[in-house]
Image (tube, rainbow, N blue to C red):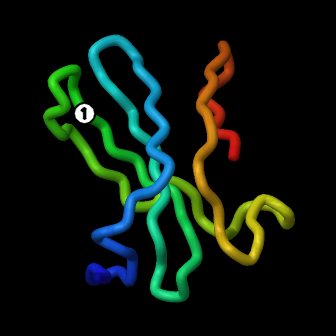
Amino acid sequence: ELNQNGYSSNISQVPTPFVIDDKIFIYLAGREENNQSYVSLLITDINFEIIEIKERVFTKSLKLGTFDDEGVMPGYVMQDEIGRYLNN
């Protein structure tokens, strides 16, 4: 089933959690109408109450080679003094 933006509302793959203080950032893959995967972000508190949902974390306007013909899925999250990084 697709929502009004053409994104899958019933497929979530590869949930990848990252905890910061009292929030859990859960990156996950969904599917578009053309069956390509994309990364969304679900932010919850420590009791898993939803704080925020970001339907698309990245856009396809990134550099050539950062997506393949099937889209992108999260792999793991790491953070340093500069920022947070999501590898796939």
Q: Please indicate whether residue 32 sits to the left or right of residue 85 in the image.
A: left
Q: Please indicate whether residue 79 sits to the left or right of residue 56 in the image.
A: right
Looking at the image, which residue is at 44% across and 32% down?
17
Pinpoint residue 34: horizontal percent, then vertical percent.
Answer: 54, 88
In the rendered view, tell whether residue 21 sits above or below residue 74: above
For residue 35, which quarter of the picture? Answer: bottom right
For residue 84, which quarter of the picture? Answer: top right
Q: Please indicate whether residue 54 sits to the left or right of residue 56 in the image.
A: left
The quarter in which the N terminus is drawn is bottom left
Pinpoint residue 75: horizontal percent, then vertical percent.
Answer: 63, 42
In the rendered view, tell whether residue 83 sits above or below residue 62: above
Looking at the image, which residue is at 41% across and 20% down?
19
Pinpoint residue 68: horizontal percent, then vertical percent.
Answer: 77, 69
In the rendered view, tell whether residue 26 sits above or below residue 10: above
Residue sticking out furthest to the right: 65
In the rendered view, tell whether residue 66 sits above or below residue 80: below
Amino acid at pointer 1: Thr
Q: Secondary structure at mark 1?
A: strand
* Residue at mark 1: 44
For residue 62, which quarter of the picture? Answer: bottom right
For label 1, count other residues whose C-alpha is less than 10 Å away and answer few (under 14), some (14-19) or many (20+).
some
Looking at the image, which residue is at 22% across and 20% down?
46
